Image (cartoon, rainbow, N blue to C red):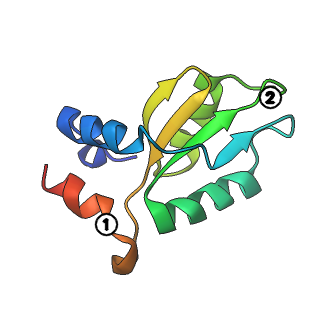
Amino acid sequence: MEDDNLLRGKQKRYLRAHAHSMRPLFSVGKNGLTKTWLAQLTGALENRELIKINLQQSADVDVDDTKAYIEENTDIQVVQTIGRVLVLYRPATNEENQKISVIVENI
């Protein structure tokens, strides 16, 4: 990930506040982290830009492993981790889906 693509503090604060009332859309279970799961995650972020994922108790990986895997293999940014929940952000490439990223850009 390029350094100029990193979020600033105020942007992260806005995203965390926006994600507060959201429910996790994806979860990591005993199958762990796979390229297929990552592709589904990227597709969901293309439509929504901001999602939460949850690590199930049966997951073989922890939050730090999951965060590192996502950030190393995609351009998705982990905005926040709370317990076993991660908040993920990625600006949509399709202009129709760019609702949150337009606001974040201007912060």
Crowdedness of circle 1 by 10 Å Cα count: few (<14), some, many (20+)?
Answer: some
Question: Is label 2 in a helix, a strand or a loop?
Answer: loop
Residue furthest to the left in view is 106
* Vertical side of 2 occupied by 28: above or below: above
Indicate whether 89 appears above or below 61: below
In x, y percent, where is residue 14?
Answer: 26, 41
Which amino acid type is shown beneath numbered disc 2? Ala
Please name the residue shown 59% across and 23% down the image. Answer: 64
What's the residue at 29%, 42% (across, down)?
6
Q: Position of residue 25 (x, y in %)?
A: 62, 50
What amino acid is found at the position of numbered circle 1 in the picture?
Answer: Lys
- Residue appearing at x 23%, y 53% in the figure: 104
Pick whichever, 3 or 90, lies toward us.
90
Q: Mark 2 or mark 1: which comes first in sequence?
A: 2
Return the residue at label 1: 99
Query: CA–CA distance between discs 2 and 1?
Result: 32 Å
Residue most toward the front? 21
Q: Residues within 10 Å of mark 2 (few under 14, many from 20)?
A: some
Q: Which residue is mark 2?
A: 59
Q: Is residue 98 left or right of residue 106?
A: right
Of circles 2 and 1, the one toward us is 1
